[in-house]
Image (spheres, coloured by chain):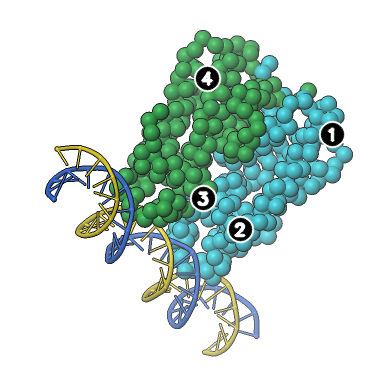
Chain colours: A cyan, B green, C blue, D yellow
DNA sequence: AAAGTAAACTAACAATTGTTAGTTTGTCGT
DNA sequence: ACGACAAACTAACAATTGTTAGTTTACTTT
């Protein structure tokens, strides 16, 4: 663990503000005030407001990409892979729930890195879809619409950031297992 | 069907812009330009930017509240009620997918009506939770964590707006049934 | 033709935006 | 004590923001 630089501190503070009001509604003066300094001082450490957003989003997107690559290439069956994906989301979201808000809601304000982000996301979704389709072929998953399955599971996983900061009683492992169960086997008895 | 007033037209245009960039990033001049008029002209029909957002969000929130009231008071069992809730979301989202983006992402920028909105939302979630808890008591639903179930199902339903405009091949009824199936019985064979 | 009205316009405002330039302050190794 | 450097500051900028005031345009009703 490297210790936190001033730039890291700016990013951490901004992340918290962005999740509450969204990127566009947060001003450089808001960020500065939250750190007890003046807006101009921020520019000793970062080059633009954009850069803060890129740092938050791209690093998270790359975490997902890397996690997915490992899961995809493993020798696990489809169901185990899906459980790993759930765990990946719970893990990343627990470490940075506020950043996940930006990833979900503010990605369209990326300018320079927008194309790169979209590429990562598309790739992630494709891998996810392939795992589900393989599960159907292997008769591990029920033979209903793969798109509906993908959408349903991914929607829940993407919304974790709203929920995780509030429910600290359910720990990591427990939440991941519980969620896998609900997503995979449903809620009906 | 009443015919569309100029104010309705402003709201409709704004709804589309808000879903693409979010409320804060859309200017009155953006809205005006999209309608082929000048920003000042908008004020012949609306009193503020705020009013546009309130109109979009509050009307949708009230639709959900009314729909939930009917479902709650029906004589259906828990599973039928849950299917009705899925159908409610699919129905409202299909009619106004872009408005659902504001409901999900821009509610925090409500000023005057923020408290009212939060009250509607809390009430909705409470009713949803009670239906799930009753389902567990009746042994219609499996006895796992009710909060995880609520979160999982509601997250998927709230994300429908991202998805519905793209997948027009799956019709209303079909999507609703398919989604109910996945949410209730899971994806495992 | 006159009057009324809905809905557009031009021009401007005060406030706020991201950002830059140049300067001061405090801490550290020499 | 001295120089270097990181990191804060003040002051200002050009552009953009939501909004207002007053005016013009084009129909419709009288």
- Residues flagged by tags 1 and 3 on a common chain: no
Confirm or deny contact between disc 3 and disc 2 (CB under 8 A).
no
| Quarter of the figure with the N terminus of chain B | top left
Is residue B27 among what the camera can see?
no
Of labels 2 and 1, earlier in sequence is 2
Q: Give residue A54's mark.
A: 2
Q: Nearer the viewer, mark 3 or mark 2?
A: 3
Q: Is residue C28 left or right of residue B3?
A: right
Q: Quadrant of residue A184?
A: top right
Q: CA distance from mark 3 to mark 2?
A: 16 Å
Q: CA distance from mark 1 to mark 3?
A: 40 Å
Q: Chain of mark 2?
A: A
**Horizontal and vertical percent position of residue A33:** 44, 59
- Residues flagged by tags 3 and 4 on a common chain: yes
Confirm or deny contact between disc 4 and disc 1 (CB under 8 A).
no
| Quarter of the figure with the C terminus of chain B | top right
Determine crowd level at label 4: few under 14, some 14-19, many 20+ residues with C-alpha closer than 10 A.
some
Q: Is residue A42 left or right of residue B172?
A: left
Q: Which residue is mark 4?
A: B130
**Horizontal and vertical percent position of residue A164:** 59, 38
Confirm or deny contact between disc 2 and disc 4 (CB under 8 A).
no
Q: Which residue is mark 1?
A: A77
- Residues flagged by tags 2 and 4 on a common chain: no
For the residue labelled by badge 1, is the local secondary structure a helix, a strand or a loop? loop
Q: Is residue B77 left or right of residue A188?
A: left
Residue at the right extreme of this rendering: A75
Q: CA distance from mark 2 to mark 1?
A: 35 Å
Is residue B95 among what the camera can see?
yes
Q: Is residue B161 left or right of residue A175?
A: left
Q: CA distance from mark 2 to mark 4?
A: 41 Å
Q: Give residue B21's mark.
A: 3
Query: Residue shown at 79%/37% (left/top)?
Result: A131
């Amino acid at each position: 663990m490297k210790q936190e630089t001033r730039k890291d501190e700016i990013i951490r503070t901004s992340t918290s503000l962005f999740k509450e009001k969204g990127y566009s509604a947060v001003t450089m003066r808001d960020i500065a005030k939250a750190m007890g300094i003046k807006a101009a001082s921020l520019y000793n450490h970062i080059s633009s407001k954009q850069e803060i957003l890129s740092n938050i989003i791209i690093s998270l997107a790359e975490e997902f990409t890397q996690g997915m690559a490992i899961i995809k290439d493993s020798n696990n069956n489809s169901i185990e892979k899906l459980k790993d994906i759930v765990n990946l989301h719970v893990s990343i979201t627990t470490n940075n729930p506020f950043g996940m808000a930006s990833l979900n809601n503010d990605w369209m304000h990326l300018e320079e890195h927008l194309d790169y982000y979209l590429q990562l996301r598309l790739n992630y979704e494709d891998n996810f879809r392939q795992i589900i389709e393989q599960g159907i072929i292997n008769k591990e998953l029920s033979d209903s619409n793969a798109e509906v399955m993908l959408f349903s599971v991914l929607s829940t996983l993407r919304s974790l950031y709203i929920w995780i900061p509030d429910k600290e009683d359910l720990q990591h492992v427990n939440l991941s297992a519980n969620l896998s169960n609900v997503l995979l086997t449903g809620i009906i008895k």
